[in-house]
Amino acid sequence: METGGTSSSGEGFLSRMALNDNKAGMEGLDRDKINKIIMKSSKGSRFYENEMKKEQQVNQRIERMMLQKAHITEQQLSKAQTQVEKMTFDLERVRDLSRVIVHVDMDAFYAAVETRDCPDLKDKPMAVGSMSMLTTSNYHARKFGVRAAMPGFIAKKLCPNLVIVPTDFDKYRAVSTEVQEIFADYDPHFLPMSLDEAYLDISEHLEQRRVWPEALRTHRLRTNDTGTEQGDGLQETVEGLSPVLFEDSPSSSSCPFLQDAPGGGAGGDVMVFGTCAEEAVREMRFRIEQKTSLTASAGIAPNMMLAKVCSDKNKPNGQYRLPSNRQAVMVFIQDLPVRKVSGIGNVTEKMLGALGITSCIHLGQEMALLALLFSETSWHHFLDISLGLGSTHIERDGERKSMSTERTFGEMVALEEQCSLCRQLCQDLAQDLQKEALKGKTVTLKLKNVNFEVKTRAWTLPCAVATSDELFAVAKDLLKTEIDNVSPQPLRLRLMGIRVSSFVSADDKKPQQKSIVGFLQKGRTQTPIQKNPNTSAETHFSMSALTASDNMTHAPTASSTEAHVSTSLCWSTEPGTDSLTCPVCFREVNTTDLTVFNRHVDQCLSGVPMEHNIHTDTELERGSSRDPLSRCMLDSLGLRLDSSAGDNKGLLLYETSTTNISLNAVALNPVCLNTCPNGGVSIPRVTDPNILKGSSQSDPCVRPLSPRGPRPMTTPKVESHDPREPTLTCPVCQVTQDTDNLTLFNRHVDLCLNQEVLHELEGLASVDCTTHNATPAAHKGQCFRDVLFND
DNA sequence: GGGGGAAGGACCA
DNA sequence: TTCCTGGTCCTTCCCCC
């Protein structure tokens, strides 16, 4: 490929941005002309600058590799050669040529569907996508250098008459389903790679097909308009079926099936196909065309790697069979450019190119060198390619590894917007996870800034999560950390994404769901809450547990730690009890069935709305809801007790030491723990142990909830006032207070601000920083961060 | 030193 | 004026056991 090399022209030409004509229908283009237009359109853009940076990184990688190569001794090389030979021998011994693997690829799929549905597009250069990005182009457009993965605005410069049609995935999915129904007739275990591509192992089908009567291999033609059989002018009718995407299809300009179908295929209104692999595949493609009016190309080979290459050989609307014998495979591989092999992309091609390796035969020749320069995984892959080996076993339904959603947008700077987008993405992802009943332990935030630099930040929880709130609890912290990192500059984003991975399997789910006691108590035996009042008194909400996960080796932010609590909670039980007490509402649930009980706990947790007022009836009832201590603490935090509420709507978490009791965290919504505004309150220890109800007073593992320490006071204090003025006006609520006592007044401001904080936590609305001295915008941002993330 | 997590990147359709 | 999305796998680095 000419794209190899670094800066090939005096204009600072970027090879990675040059036309990639490694696609059917793009042979013999005026690359120089096309590349000039691409460069002119791109140069100077942020995208271009970033590509340049990436290109430099690749070049540095190549330089390091070449340096490494220069130090390789003859002895090392010969040792590696021995290793390669042994490996080759082993691989040859188990080479499997028995399977017949087919790779089917629909031709210019999205474009073909659109052309079929809008015949006006037939003779026009068209592409599917948007001005930002094209997903595919038809063959007329490819002649101008327009291809998939090219931004529409550049495509328009290459081909001003290009028609860009927006994508309609529902439509493509429907067509894909039709096609896949046909695949299933040849291999019920076929492997779809995308909407337009699949691998099939037709070995079994061919076995059966050998003895099939002709009737089973006979297919009727249908007319284009009515879908009924037609009896005259077979050629004419079929010609009318295909969308005209290809002027010079390798197979035929009209219908390949009529020309060379054995058995006198064109016998009127039916087509008869033979029993061999080529015939079976031809039949499959014929049926696809009859059913969808779209064409497909196919490759037939002894393994998946070769089948994939073969399907590209006679594209579009063609097929190619590679005979199942070693010699044929080796001849085929010899001149195959490495870039044609799936898995070798732009970077690998360039690195190999630097070593003088451009085709697969070179791979084999330089294998000892490659074994010394590349990782084991890489050179084993190269060795496979050089021997024409690939997977002969089509594995379907492999376990999904991750699920994600991401969105690209125009520059986004506002924290409010970023936060609300983050929440939206979490909601979307939670829905997707729910559809597949998946829960994962790792949540990853992906950010791309306006300079196209991509960052990913991941956090792994001890238990799997799936709900929107759980995801958001983690994601917002990761986002917060990134915002802090660039502060006081804003994060200028163009993409945000959320991914969940490390899924727990069905078997893993049970042990994952530790009892709340087991979860909250580090290193202790799980203790179920039972009906027995003596044992129920053992309930612990140990602060230590909030940071106690053994798995937590890193703790980037306080709230990441809090997110540990956002995992699904469940309870354990012991034989012999007939009811269990819910750790959230503290009501007895008349069941010993853990599934039923845990559903109750889940509902208790998930049904809790974010509220200003903490309804603490049960929690404090059990501990000290009527107790002056808790009232005092809550008052100090500006939280109101609402004892009229029947349900427990909040969770207070105490931290204790030998001298103090601190209320550090409040879970307005228990899946979203928050450190208390202003860092919580701390008071001297009281002697009544009931207040803390079994909290881990002597637990040596007690640690502050937040590794960053308590939240600093952000309340604006009024330092002085005009003594002639008997009143003061609160800077938060703007209400005049009937006092001139500064202590009392500041207490009011505290309370007021805490209400504001809670309000912000709920509604993500902006804060009116009327009390700050700096510019409103700057303080709004700062205040908003404080509010959102309890900084 | 091995295992596992985090971060980044290559590659694919 | 404008360069996607969703997924897998691999590599490198780092920490912990």
Image (tube, coloured by chain):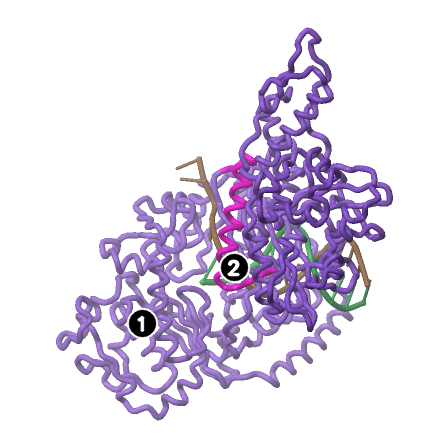
Chain colours: A purple, B green, C brown
Check disc 1: other Cα within 10 Å, few if <14, some if 14-19, many if 20+. many
Q: Where does the image place residue A320, in percent across and percent down from the top left?
A: 40, 75
At 73% from the left and 21% from the top, the residue drawn is A743
A67 lies above or below A371: above
Residue at the far bottom: name it: A211
At 29% from the left and 67% from the top, the residue drawn is A292
Question: Which residue range is magenta in the image?
Answer: A411-440
Q: Chain of mark 1?
A: A
> Dot 1 lies on which element?
helix
Q: Where does the image place residue C3, in percent across and percent down from the top left?
A: 47, 45
Q: Where does the image place residue A666, in percent across and percent down from the top left?
A: 67, 43
Which of the image's four quarters has the C terminus of chain A?
A: top right
Please identify the dominant SS of the magenta region.
Answer: helix
At 34% from the left and 53% from the top, the residue drawn is A141
Kindly identify the amino acid type of the residue bearing the numbered disc 1.
Ile
A687 lies above or below A218: above
Residue at the far top: name it: A724
Specify whether residue A771 is in view: yes
- The answer to which of marks 2 and 1 sits earlier in the sequence is 1
| Disc assigned to residue A433 | 2
| Disc assigned to residue A288 | 1
